Amino acid sequence: MPLYQYSLEYWPRESYCVFEYYGPEMAGGADVAGLVAGSAGGGKANVEFRRADVTLLADAHPGSLVRRVWERHEGLAAPFCVVVAPNGSEIFAGPMGTRDAELLVRSPQRHRLAQLLAEGKEGLLLLLTGSHPDASNRARQSVETALQQAGQAGHDVGWMVVDRQDPDEVWTVRQLLAVRPDLALIGEPMLFGVFGRGRVVEPRVGEQITAGAVADLIEFFNAPCACDVVYEILSVDLLTDFHWPVAASEGPVEDERPYYSLFAPPPRPQQIESPAAAPTPAVAAPAGGGLFRNALVALGCLAVVAFTAGFLVLKRRTGS
């Protein structure tokens, strides 16, 4: 089964987290809470919502996630929200209104993207426009030409363009740029591959957007699925409230990764170095090698003793 099909049917989405911090005299932004929590109801939107009174956080456990997120933004005046992507990247921190909450969980382009993937497209190519129209147009022409050739070869790949300046897609842009930490600093057009239920992979940027790059992405979408792909590539799920036709949680994939708290990098395995003077054997010793080696030493000693005794006896006889 190709990756695009397997991931659509079996890969569960990873969730965004929205933290809302408010004061005791505030209602706590009921519109934001209601919209986000309501969208997550029934498992439609991959988002979790947490609220906290800032006057009570001093008594919260120092290691709690809601406190650690707040400590990063103590200078902000409450009420404010912090939005964290599934990979731990903060994509927003500040006041959030009703319109922001609506666009966070749903936008026209993300809904269309989900529809195309649910229809069974062999993945989807998403072009995020850059700061210069000419560069964006060249990138678009390259992709369209390559897709025409792919279509003639029998490939059915989704295709869409997201304008970086579109006010309805501001949250889409933030989510796309969360794939890699430095992307927010780059103003060039970017070509993202999207597959499964909105999984976005690291983009091709600027001059990297070529017919060859399009062919590589199509090959990636159609490669035989390996479950460790999701851990080996830079990628992040988009946030959508689309009602996917198949329940991914019922699939056979089991996530065996250890859980690490947001903002805390995974611990590195301890490196044990051998002493500098310790030689490395050319051939590994077999099981029970210590006993075998001791037996050889004992036999060698017996042979030396026997040889010495025989030599002495022979010498005496010769002398006599």
Image: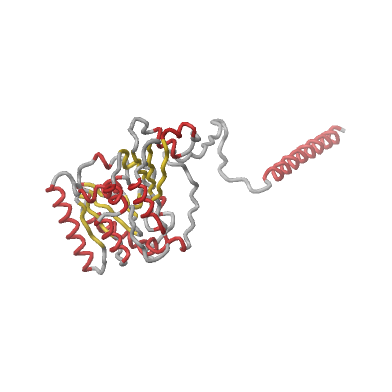
Q: Nearer the viewer, residue 295 or 110?
A: 110
Q: Is residue 12 above or below residue 66?
A: below
Quadrant in the picture for residue 45: bottom left
Question: In x, y percent, where is residue 14?
Answer: 40, 52
Residue 208 on image: x %, y % = 22, 49
Question: Total of numbered circles in the picture?
Answer: 0
On screen, residue 5 versus residue 139, left or right, reads right
Of the pair 28 and 63, the residue shown nearer to us: 28
Task: Please indicate whether residue 89 sits to the left or right of residue 211 in the image.
Answer: right
Q: Residue furthest front?
A: 25
The quarter in which the C terminus is drawn is top right
Q: Quadrant of the N terminus?
A: bottom left
Q: Nearer the viewer, residue 297 or 128?
A: 128
| Residue 303, image quadrant | top right
Q: Residue furthest right?
A: 320
What colour scheme does the image use?
secondary structure
Q: Is residue 288 above or below residue 248?
A: above
Find residue 171 and report its horizontal and vertical position in percent: 27, 48
Q: Is residue 211 above or below residue 52?
A: below
Closest to the observer: 147 or 253? 253
Where is residue 123 drawn, in percent x and y? 30, 61
Determine the residue positioned at 21% across, 62% down: 147
